[in-house]
Image (cartoon, rainbow, N blue to C red):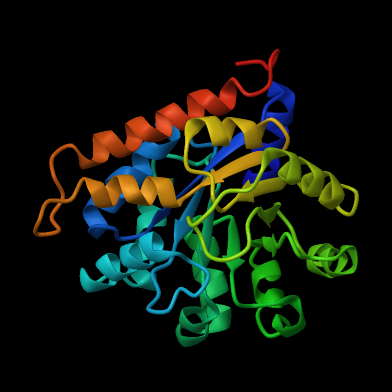
Amino acid sequence: MSRLETRFAALRDEGRGGLVTFVTAGDPTTEISAEILSGLPGAGADIIELGMPFTDPMADGPSIEMASGRALTKGQNTAKTLEMVSAFRKNDGDTPIVLMGYYNPIHAYGREKFAADVSAAGVDGLIIVDLPPEEEDEFRPHAESSGVDIVRLIAPTSTDARIGTLVENASGFVYYVAVRGVTGTSSAAASDIASNVGRIKSLTDLPVAVGFGIRTPEQAAEVAAVADASVVGTAIVDKIANALDENGNATPQLVSETLDFVSDLAKAVRSARPGANS
């Protein structure tokens, strides 16, 4: 079993939904980002989504766009991101890591080399925002041969037929985007999320994680009660941004405040289903 399969199986055994945390690699610096990354499992993250900085993150709102800008300004690139994952794996062989990003940097890196290198670094899955299934044939075989899952995004506007196409070659889990638009700008009603998660589950056996618009522990708990995992990104990225000084440098409390917030999210998620094992 892959790390993702193992983690979702463990969550099912515990009778609860999971917490997926998103941070941008290299924000605000490679060193501090690596420190946050290493602390996420201890704070309660079940799965880590690591953003690959890009100059034109079209699916992301202002917060993550600015995080990408901060990381790129400090010299973060694909190679450094993979080095971060490799360093993480020296101390943690269990927590799944999924890279989220855009196809341009992958194409520039080299498709086959990228798939091999992410696997060697210890990456478990990829969310490639702008690579639809109709155009993935030049990359998906490389990912599959390297044992890296392709995680699909499903929109609230997706028809059943479209969902069927999206999940056909998906693996690891599927990511339901709970709101229209970009990350971090609005939230969906819990009833709508539950309805759409049920619809997706009728069309695939893959776990369903839900993200976009989940900003508070209470919202994360609501989603974890009806889905296999809650994904929180913008709110964590904002914690990092708010702990920078007027010159954009990290304050001493940045890492601890960020991980404390993740801990609050994790506690809420773990209490979302009464009777779940802890």
Residue 228 visible from this viewpoint: no
Residue 76 falls in which quadrant of the image?
bottom left
32 relative position to 192: left or right: left
Q: Which x, y percent locates residue 88? A: 39, 47
Which residue sits furthest top?
275
Tell how many labels: 0
Residue 259: image location, x then y, percent: 34, 35
> Relative to the observer, which residue lies in front, 190 or 96?
190
Compared to residue 83, the image places residue 54 above or below, namely: below
Asked if residue 184 lies left or right of residue 172, the reply is left
Which quadrant does the N terminus fall into? Answer: top right
Which image quarter is the C terminus in?
top right
- Give how far across and how far down residue 91 sits, in percent: 39, 39
Residue at image position (48%, 55%) is 184
Which residue is drawn at the image coordinates 26% and 52% (left, top)?
241
Quarter holding residue 191: top right
Q: Is residue 225 above or below residue 136?
A: above
As rendered, which of 61 and 97 lies closer to the eye?
Answer: 61
Q: Is residue 120 something one can see in this rendering?
A: yes
The residue at the point 22 percent across, 42 percent down is 254
